Image (tube, grey):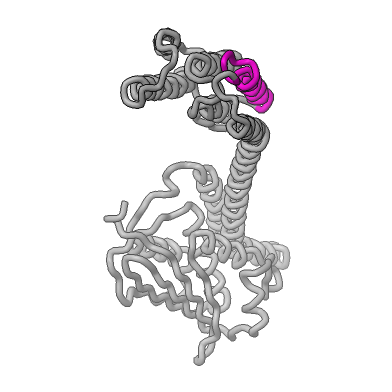
Amino acid sequence: MKKSWWRKSNSHTLEKLFWFRSVLIFVQVVTSLLAKYVFFVSFNGVGVSCVIVLLILINAYTWVHIKRPNEASSNEIFLQLVIDLAALSALFYFAGGAANPFVSMYLLPLAVGSILLSQLWVMGLALISVLAYSYLMWFYPEQHAQHNHQSFNMHLIGMWISFVLSAGIVALFIVNMRTALLRKDKLLAAAREQSMKDEKLVSLGTLAASTAHEMGNPLATIQLICSDLKADEVISQKDINTLVEQVQRCKQALQDMSSVAGSIDSNDIDRLISFKHFLTALIQDWRSSRPNLECVFEFQECDEGFIVVPAVLAKALVNLLDNAADASPIKVSIYAACNQHEAHIIIHDEGEGMAEETMQAIGNKPYSTKPDGIGLGAFLAHEAIQKMGGSVTLSNRSTGGVETLVKLPLRNINDQ
């Protein structure tokens, strides 16, 4: 699983801490200068300057160690954030104690820690910050000598309580929320992986059903010749050649299924090709497998549309064509039209048509009207086409037979 950004590498994590501390140092320098020379606030300038210089040296050390190949440990990250808390405490000690208006900056290392560390470490940071703030609140020298008004003391106490509550929220709830989000990401990744597996199963099922269609006619021919052989025990050279030819067709169908199934995970399944070229080649190959069938095929209109061709799309369309040819072994008509965004394929057979409940069942579950059919071909063809964002619709024709309408999404090559 891909790591989150805060765990990618030592350099990435320490670089985040480096820039966080750099911003902190910049804010401290600016506020110190404004307080002394603009607002004329008295504070221990030497102490504040020493703390800022020390932070700069620590940040320089961090920058030097950013390029180390090993990952930063939780101990190191925790120590870096403790240094920031200690520096903030020293700055507040030299500049007003708990009355310093920037005392809420204690929350910044906690917020960073809630992203980089586990909950136990964040709770440790929260405890340290609360203890430091409490020291400034109750034991800071001159704190109460300077401010002996009860109302101001109440204000300071309120600030302390607010900080404790905020630190507790960061340490408990925000870390829990982050953990929940990570768990949700893992569940979504697992769901996507399962969805990909399901799609592969549908693809393999479509390949198997199409292969069963392709092998049906050769096996029927073999069975017929074997029955004649059993009846009169005489077989001609022509029959032998026919048997060899039909067995070869079965072997070729199995080889095609194996080669296509092996390429399901390859990058070739997502290539864009011209829809017109794809369908024309598909119909030509399908015609060769049914030489005795009259097949009318024409494009009524066609713009230059392109299609993303999964390995199973051709097999799914062949399944639908085979169903039409089985219902109408004399003649099948195929019409196609497309623009840059959508293609329509209309298949007309001249069979007896279907009952309404039969058309509703086909595509929703395995269903067959053939005595020796297993009912997977049409079902898996519908599933494969729907996975692509297309649709298959069956309807009875007024002149007899069934019309199969296939809609497929196309793409404009300029969009790529």
Say which residue appears at 59% left-offset and 25% top-offset: 148
In this rendering, would 187 be left or right of 85? right
User: Horizontal and vertical percent for residue 12?
Assistant: 45, 22
| In this view, 56 is above or below 406 | above
**Count of picture labels:** 0
Q: Nearer the viewer, residue 374 or 151?
A: 151
Say which residue appears at 45% left-offset and 9% top-offset: 47
User: Horizontal and vertical percent for residue 211?
Assistant: 58, 57
**Would residue 330 be seen by someone viewing this image from the given angle?**
yes
In this rendering, would 168 be left or right of 210? right
In this rendering, would 387 be left or right of 160? left
User: Quadrant of residue 363 in the image?
Assistant: bottom right
**Would residue 72 be seen by someone viewing this image from the given angle?**
no
| In this view, 256 is above or below 145 | below
Say which residue appears at 55% left-offset and 78% top-offset: 394
Q: Nearer the viewer, residue 54 or 20?
A: 54
User: Horizontal and vertical percent for residue 302?
Assistant: 30, 71
Dominant secondary-structure state across the stretch colored magenta: helix
Q: Quadrant of the N terminus?
A: top right
Q: Which residues are magenta?
A: 119-144
| In this view, 349 is above or below 179 | below
User: Horizontal and vertical percent for residue 174?
Assistant: 62, 37
Q: Nearer the viewer, residue 123 or 225?
A: 123
Say which residue appears at 36% left-offset and 53% top-offset: 272
Q: Nearer the viewer, residue 29 or 41?
A: 41
User: Quadrant of residue 61 in the image?
Assistant: top left
| In this view, 204 is above or below 398 | above
Is residue 157 covered in magenta? no
Is residue 122 covered in magenta? yes
